[in-house]
Image (cartoon, rainbow, N blue to C red):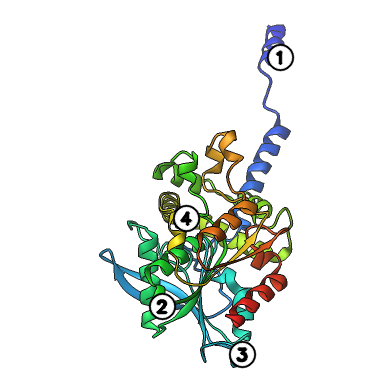
Amino acid sequence: MRGLFQQLNTRFPKPNIFSAFLIGAACLTTTMAQAAQPQYGGELQGFEYPYPVKYYQFESQGQALKMAYLDIAPAVAPQNTASPTPTIVLMHGKNFCAATWQDSIERLTQAGFRVIAPDQIGFCKSTKPQHYQFSFHQLATNTHNLLNSLNIKNASVMGHSMGGMLATRYALMFPQQTRQLILLNPIGLEDWKAKGVPYQTLDQNYQAELNKTAKGIKNYQQHTYYVGQWRPEFDKWVDMLAGMYNGKDKQRVAWNQALTSDMVFTQPVVHEFSQLKIPTLLLIGEKDNTAIGKNNASKAVQKTLGRYDILGEQAAEKIPNATLVEFADLGHSPHIQQPDRFHQTLLQYLTRN
């Protein structure tokens, strides 16, 4: 009988206490790591902006909404500008907020500009509605109404990334109120769907958004925004995004991001570049490779997408009164990657025109 028990113990060994300890420790470490990551509310509660946040309250599509924005007065009297108090409106990208314009706001106000930097509805500190028909026309109208409420009748408009698509739509809709258009590594310089990128449903977009992590966000930013480089000051922009996905309202954040992804993919502006009637500055980091849905496309199609070294030149040819400045060694966010160099170029243009 004793031999039988020995055989059974051999076939069914007792649990390894040390292994169980390791598994438990790993789970605890993962839980602690997640807890250590910042957690922000659905409207970025808990994340501090570098300037006071104001709110424009309005009704749209049957809902009461709040649009967060920064309004920073010029620090000095303007120099060599056509207007005594020139205003510039900064339109953020899809993975960005008004706060990510921090360096630009400081330099522009020091040069004599009044700066308005909104968070669009569905983003950052603005309302994230459960249901909203997102369109660039709607967001442009919201922004135009905000400016009217501030009695701003004419402004230069600068858009980065998705904000470049929005700024283009704004300039097409309100040319009389747009003094200059500045497009900083805008997405939408090509029509991804027409090039062969397959459509992703809202449900697919939503699941992809829910799966975002701080590690994945940082990896994407490092290789797309900063050409493989990383500096400690970039960490706060990872925390800003990851904190919303790590917070209690992550489902609402992800759903709004899914809706705006659909907007970006299905509402190209590239076909209307020839209709722009105002002076336009294209600031292009040539190492950028951003293309919505690129990973879902075939290998052959992927090779044709996100070629900003080519796309910038193509856009400049289509826009009637365009000036193209290319940064051969910079990525998707030149204003953050190399702020001194970028803003010197920007201010030279703004004060000359």
Q: CA distance from mark 3 to mark 2?
A: 21 Å
Task: Please say whether residue 56 is visible from this viewpoint.
Answer: no
SS at circle 4: helix
Q: Earlier in the sequence, mark 3 or mark 4?
A: 3
On the image, the x and y values in percent for residue 170 come to: 42, 68
Nearest the eye: 285 or 202: 285
| Residue 238 picture quarter | bottom right
Say which residue appears at 45% left-offset and 49% top-offset.
Answer: 265
Sequence-wise, the earlier of marks 1 and 2 is 1
Marks 4 and 1, how far apart in space?
Answer: 70 Å
Could you tell me which quadrant the C terminus lies in?
A: bottom right
**Residue lying at 58% horizontally and 53% vertically, measured from the top left:** 311
Element marked by disc 1: helix
Could you tell me which secondary element the residue under label 3 belongs to?
loop
Q: Residues within 10 Å of mark 1 (few under 14, many from 20)?
A: few
* Dot 1 amino acid type: Thr
Circle 4 is placed at which residue position? 270
Amino acid type of the residue that numbered disc 3 sits on in the rendered structure: Gln
| Label 1 sits on residue | 10
Q: Quote the CA–CA distance across marks 1 and 2.
A: 83 Å
Which badge, 3 or 2, comes first in the chain's sequence? 3
Q: Which residue is mark 3?
A: 79
Q: Name the residue: 42% across, 55% down.
A: 256
Q: Circle 2 — which element?
A: helix
Near mark 4 (Cα within 10 A), the count class, few <14, some 14-19 or many ≥20, is some
